[in-house]
Amino acid sequence: MKNAELKKRIGKEKRPAVIVITGASAGIGRATARRFASDGARIGLLARGMEGLEAARRDVEILGGEALPVPTDVSVPEQVEAAASTIEERFGPIDLWINNAMASVFSPVKEMQPEEYRRVTEVTYLGCVYGTLSALRRMLPRDHGTIVQVGSALAFRGIPLQSAYCAAKHALQGFTESLRSELLHDRSNVWVTMIHLPASNTPQFNWVKTRLPRKPQPVPPIFQPEVAAEAIHFTATDKRREFWLGLPTLLTIVGNRLVPGYIDRYLAQMGYESQQYDGPIDPNRRDNLWEPVPGDQGAHGDFDDRATDFSAQFWMATHARSLSVGGLAGLALAALIRFRRKLAG
């Protein structure tokens, strides 16, 4: 989508759109910053690590946007609020706020520590709440703006070894539904949407805290972060209530509604192995739960050879007007039948 259309849908004024992205230094946040930079947007980049933020700033500027890196721990509401003020002082009113920052721990529940649950919740759930509150303080008086919550298929279906992250995404889903209803009640033109992502090839698997015997990995099939970035851009500018990205996300959410007990047993058998690969963890490996890992981690993880840069489901969703309703229904039915056969097998 070109900048003219972006401004039409997000920014009412004749100026580049002003966007805030949390977790912008790496992974999906980094790829999303690049995607909006190509529209010429002005982007406030929020994350803890300054090296990654500076690299993200360079990416944005090379692609034609403007960027302001603001070192921020989203679990501290005062820092989030200060970052929002700094960005508006530099770029003007915020049009779009993307809550993307996250933290996780790979571990069985029986080995988790209370402070780990607290930290993951503070970043992955409360960080989005604090970002939303700062955005609303500015958007509601203007009666203008969009908030995007970056969710996951795991907001609907918990999996083993990621209980803290799954719980935080479940909480974010409930929070967003409550807020959406309130905005509708108030007849506000501020829009909130949530996009649920599949497994993605990001650096988080190199720095996430883990107690697994082998290296952690995203559950295949794996998508490149640019697929998520394009979908976030689409969701933000198309005023979708909610968007499920990728066939795996669709099958996970719908399958859990149809046969939740069966999926419990399926994940009990397959959920441990599918989240690990290769050999044991380096004993000197650093994690980012409490502080950022030094250096520029980039957008991609270690799974380029196994990740795809195309989602047929996303293509169909964005070309729905050119597809017949019957054709879409047939594709959806075929996908569900295939999923149920896979579970039965």
Image: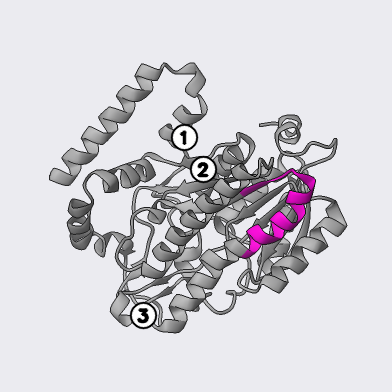
The answer for how far apart the CA atoms under marks 3 and 1 are is 36 Å
Q: Residue 104 lies in what quarter of the image? A: bottom left
Whether residue 313 appears in magenta in the rendering, the answer is no
Tag of residue 314: 1
Q: Residue 138 lies in what quarter of the image? A: bottom right
Say few, some or many: other residues with alpha carbon within 10 Å of mark 1 (under 14 / 14 to 19 / 20 or more): many
The residue that disc 3 covers is 112
Mark 1 touches mark 2? (CB < 8 Å): yes
The answer for how far apart the CA atoms under marks 3 and 2 are is 32 Å
Say few, some or many: other residues with alpha carbon within 10 Å of mark 3 (under 14 / 14 to 19 / 20 or more): some
Label 3: element kind:
loop
The quarter of the rendered structure image containing the C terminus is top left
**Is residue 297 shown to the viewer in this render?**
no
Q: Answer above or below: position of 318 versus 232.
A: above
Mark 3 touches mark 2? (CB < 8 Å): no
Q: Whole-percent x and y of residue 60?
A: 73, 50
Choose between 84 and 57: the one closer to the eye: 84
Say few, some or many: other residues with alpha carbon within 10 Å of mark 2 (under 14 / 14 to 19 / 20 or more): many
Label 1: element kind:
helix
Q: Whole-percent x and y of residue 233?
A: 61, 41
Extent of the magenta region: 130-147
Q: Whole-percent x and y of residue 107?
A: 34, 74
The quarter of the rendered structure image containing the N terminus is top right
The residue that disc 2 covers is 227
Q: Amino acid at mark 3?
A: Met
Q: Which residue occupies 40% across, 19% down? A: 325
Magenta span main SS: helix
